[in-house]
Image (cartoon, rainbow, N blue to C red):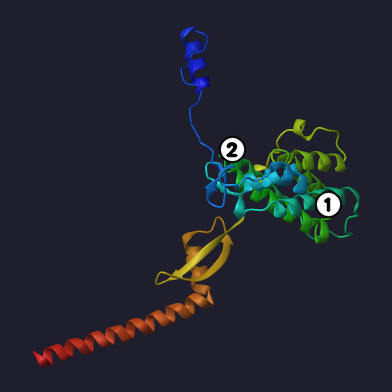
Amino acid sequence: MYARFITKVLYDLGMVPFVEPFTKLMNQGQVIMAGKAMSKTLGNLVNLQEQIAAYGPDAVRVTMVFAGPPEDDIDWADVSPTGAMKWLARVWRLTGDIAVLPSPAEPDVDPARSIHKLVAEATTALDTRRLNVGISRLMELTNVLRRAVDSGAGPDHPTVREGAEDLVRMLSCFAPFTAEEGWERLGHEPSVASAGWPQADPTLLVEDTVTCILQVDGKLRDRVDVPADSSDEDLTAIALASERVQTALAGATVGRGHRAGAEARQRRHDLITA
């Protein structure tokens, strides 16, 4: 409210060319407890210092952001920082493993496409204020990197290291202490906040294949992965080649035959009784 008053004064003085300082308004939700607003009278207060002492400030912050969209209320009775604390511990271990573990002799997985896709999705989520979705994508990225370290490309694969750096850089928005430690463990000077936001490679975001849903009589019969540039003729041939679709089509044909026979018998009965 005061920002609007000050802006209008500055406009009247000819110092700014606009009268409204904000183009959009978002009212953030409250943190409530057991369905009610926290108050001393109700005795349902949550001691923030106790939460921070038990779980750490990063875990508490991540829990609040991940609980839902910023405009919704958060019921503290329904959430717990335990899950956030475990995830941040996984990120911390991941950065250490990438720094010290040897790579498999013959890597069999290149996670570049998955990494860049999740970086792009997290970026879009934060740009649209879906912060909880952004954290979800960072959790997925942690899983992708963990699998790559354990059984795929290996910890010293350039793509894996780049993905870990991207993860830590984005994480700094929500868990700055964990991000700073992870950035240092990856061999960088502080601060991660000065490293900038990661950029996804557009060429790796293009899908080579898409999942095609096959339906018969309005019911899902099968899913198949097809080339993204498949023509209508190709899609028709792929659909008809599916055993599940063939079975469904055969059943549909029999069913229509039975219905047609029943309708014919009913018409004959009507003519006779008439």
- What amino acid does circle 2 point to? Asp
Q: Mark 2 — residue?
A: 127
Between circles 1 and 2, the one closer to the viewer is: 1
Residue 255, image x, y percentages: 36, 83
Q: Earlier in the sequence, mark 1 or mark 2?
A: 1
- Would you identify the image quadrant in which residue 173 lies? top right
> Is residue 121 at all visible to an observer of this figure?
no
**How many marks are shown on the rendered structure?**
2
From the viewer's perspective, tell me whether residue 264 is left or right of residue 159.
left
Residue 96, compared with residue 253, is above or below; it is above
Residue 65, compared with residue 216, is above or below; it is above
The residue under the point 69% across, 48% down is 138
List the single residue furthest toward the left.
Answer: 274
List the single residue furthest toward the front.
Answer: 41
Residue 124, compared with residue 220, is above or below; it is above
Q: Nearer the viewer, residue 271 or 229?
A: 271
The residue under the point 88% across, 47% down is 99
Residue 71, image x, y percentages: 52, 41
- What amino acid does circle 1 point to? Arg
Tag on residue 102?
A: none
Q: Nearer the viewer, residue 21 or 76?
A: 76
Q: Mark 1 — residue?
A: 93
Secondary structure of the residue carrying numbered label 2:
helix
The residue under the point 49% across, 7% down is 14
Residue 36, image x, y percentages: 53, 48
Residue 179, compared with residue 2, is above or below; it is below
Q: For the residues marked 1 and 2, what is the alpha-carbon distance in whole angstroms?
A: 28 Å
From the viewer's perspective, tell me whether residue 220 is left or right of residue 267.
right
> Is residue 231 at all visible to an observer of this figure?
yes
Q: Nearer the viewer, residue 142 or 207?
A: 142
Residue 129, image x, y percentages: 57, 39
Secondary structure of the residue carrying numbered label 1:
helix
